[in-house]
Amino acid sequence: MIDALINGMRDTNPSVRSKAFEALGNMGGKAAVNEVINALVNAMRDKNSDDRLKACEALGKIGEEAATNELIDALINAMRDQSSDVRSKACGTLRNIGEKVATDEIIEALIKAMTDEDWRVRWDACATLADMGEKTATNQIIDALIDAMENQYSDVRRKICEALGNMGEKTTTKKVMDALINAMGDQDWEVRCIACRGLSKLNEKASTKVIDALINGMRDKNSYVQRSACKAFSEMGEKVATKKVIIALINTIGDKDYDVRSQVCEALGKMGEQGATDEVISVLLNAMQDSVYSVRLNACEALGEVAGEAVTSGVVNALSNAIRDEKYEVRWKACKALGKLGEKTATRDVMDALISAIENEDSTVRWRACAGFGNMGEKAATKEVIRALMHAMQDEHYFVRWSACEALEHIQMKPKIQQSIFNDFQEYIIHSTSPISSDLIKYL
C-alpha cells in the first residue's frame, strides 16, 4: 500500500497527488519508513507549491519518527520558501515533530521566521519555539525567546511572553523573571496582560521586583492590565500577602472599572491571615454595597475567607442582607460565606442568619444554608437549627432535602435533642414515604 501511495504522489493529476499526501499523513507513525520520508522530503522541492505544502503537512502528521537530518535540512529550506503557506506549514511541522529538532540551525531559522512579512509565519515560528522552550527549557531556547522579545511585531511578543510564563512554572530563572518584568513596560497592552499572568506562575516566592511590577500594573492606564495584575495577586495568594500588596489592593478597590474592583475583592480574599485586618474587612463591607453585582459577589466570598475568628455583627448583618440581594449569585455566595464563617465561629448571629436563609425564596440559597450547618458539625446541634433542617427536609427541591439530610448526618445531636425533635416531627416522619425521610429515621 505504501508503494502505491508513493507512486500516487507522482501522479499527473493534482487531486490524486493531494489524496496520496493526505493518506500518508493520516497513517501517522506507521508511515515513518525511509521510503516515505525520503519521498516526502523530495516532494518538498517540487515546483508545485501545493505539493510542497501537502508534503510538509504529511511530515508533520507522521511526527517525531520523521526526524532525520535530511528532513531538518528540507524544513529549513522550506522556511525560506517563496510561498508563505509553505513557510508557515514548515514551522508548524517542526512544532509537531517536537524538541527532537531543536538544533542550533533550526532555532536560528525560527528566530529569523519571527520577522516574516506574513503574520501566520511569524506566529507559527514563535509558537514552535515556545513549545520547544516549554518542553525543554534550555538556556539556548530561553535566550532565543528573550532576545526575540525585541521583535517589532506585537503578536510575536505576546506568544513569547506566554511561553516564558509557562516555562516559569517549571524553571524559574532570573532571566525569565526579568524578561517578564520588562514586558510589563511593553507598548502593547496585551503583552502587558500576558506578562502579569506569567509573573503569577513563577515557581518560587515572589521577589520585591515582581511585586513592584504588579503593583505598577494595577496603576496601568489600561483596565485590562489592571485586572490582570490584580488577578496575578489573587493567584499568588499568601505568597504575596505583604502589607505593601494589601495596601495597594485597598487603594485600588475604588477604581472606576467594576471588573478591577471585583478582581481586587477576590485578591483580598486570597491574602490569608495577613488579610484579616479591620481595614480589609471595612473595604469589603463597603464593596458589598457596590452597584455592580460581580463586585458584591466577590466581596461576599472574600469576607467568608478573611473574617476568620473575629466575626463582627457588622459582617454577619452585611452577609444576611446580601441573602436578599436581587442577584441569586450574590445570595448564594453570601450564604456560602456565612457557612464558612460558621465553621470557624458558630455564633448565634451566624446561625440565626443561616436559619433565616433556609426560608429564602431561592432554592440555591436554601441548599447552601443547609450545607453551611453541615460544615459546622456539632456546633450546630441546637433545637432551632435541627428544626430548621427538618423543615428543609420537606422542601420541593430534592437537592435542598438532600443537603439538609447530609447536614443532619454531620451534626452530633445529644439524646435529649434527638428525642425532642423526633416527637415534634413524629407525625411527618411516620407518614412520609420519602427515601430521605427513611434515612433520617435510621439516623435518629
Image (cartoon, rainbow, N blue to C red):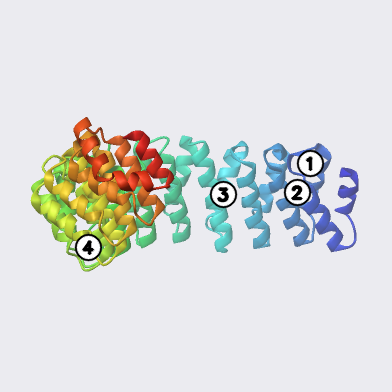
Label 4: few (<14), some or many (≥20) within 10 Å? some
Q: Are marks 4 and 3 in contact (CB under 8 Å)?
A: no
**Nearer the viewer's eye, disc 2 or disc 4?**
4
- Residue assigned mark 1: 31
Q: Are marks 3 and 2 in contact (CB under 8 Å)?
A: no
Label 1: few (<14), some or many (≥20) within 10 Å? many
Q: CA distance from mark 3 to mark 1?
A: 26 Å
Q: CA distance from mark 4 to mark 1?
A: 65 Å
Identity, as a three-letter code, of the amino acid under mark 1: Ala
Identity, as a three-letter code, of the amino acid under mark 4: Arg
- Residue assigned mark 3: 110
- Residue assigned mark 2: 25
Q: Earlier in the sequence, mark 2 or mark 4?
A: 2
Q: Earlier in the sequence, mark 4 or mark 3?
A: 3
**Nearer the viewer's eye, disc 3 or disc 2?**
2
- Residue assigned mark 4: 324
